[in-house]
Image: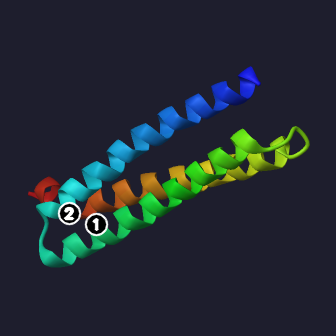
C-alpha cells in the first residue's frame, strides 16, 4: 500500500504545481484585452477540467483493487502526458502572442 500512497502523493504535488500554472494563466487573463481574455479563460477552463479528470483518476487509483491498479495507473499516466503537453503548448502559444514580449 505504501507505493500506492507515494504515487498519489507525488501526483498531488504535480497537480498542485500545475494548479499554480493555471492560476498564472487566469491572472494574465485578468489583465488582457477582451479577445485575449476570452482565449486565456477558455484555455484555463480546459486545463482545469483536465486536471480535475486526473484528480478523479487518482481517487480511482486509491480505491482500485490490486488487479485494476495497472490499468488505472496507465490511464493516469496517459492523462498526465496529455495534460503536460496541453499546459506546455498553452503557455508557449500565449507567450508567443504576448504583446509585452513583442514590445
List the single residue furthest toward the front. Answer: 63
Residue at image x 42%, y 39%?
Answer: 16
Q: Earlier in the sequence, mark 1 or mark 2?
A: 2
List the single residue furthest toward the left. Answer: 103
Q: Quadrant of residue 10?
A: top right
Residue 29's label in the rendered image is 2
Residue at image x 19%, y 54%?
Answer: 27
Residue at image x 49%, y 32%?
Answer: 13
Indicate the secondary structure of the residue bearing disc 2: helix
List the single residue furthest toward the bottom. Answer: 35
Q: Position of residue 18 (x, y in %)?
A: 42, 44
Are there few (<14), some (14-19), or many (20+) residues within 10 Å of tag 2?
many
Q: Is residue 40 above or below residue 72?
A: below
Tag 1 near tag 2, CB within 8 Å: yes
Indicate the secondary structure of the residue bearing disc 1: helix
Q: Position of residue 73 (x, y in %)?
A: 75, 44
Residue 40's label in the rendered image is 1
Amino acid at each position: 500500500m505504501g507505493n500506492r500512497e507515494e504515487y498519489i502523493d507525488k501526483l498531488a504535488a504535480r497537480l498542485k504545481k500545475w494548479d499554480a500554472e493555471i492560476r498564472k494563466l487566469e491572472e494574465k487573463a485578468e489583465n488582457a484585452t477582451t479577445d485575449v481574455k476570452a482565449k486565456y479563460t477558455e484555455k484555463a477552463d480546459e486545463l482545469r477540467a483536465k486536471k480535475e479528470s486526473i484528480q478523479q483518476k487518482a481517487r480511482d487509483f486509491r480505491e482500485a483493487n490490486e488487479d485494476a491498479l495497472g490499468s488505472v495507473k496507465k490511464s493516469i499516466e496517459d492523462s498526465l502526458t496529455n495534460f503536460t503537453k496541453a499546459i506546455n503548448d498553452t503557455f508557449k502559444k500565449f507567450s508567443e502572442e504576448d504583446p509585452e514580449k513583442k514590445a
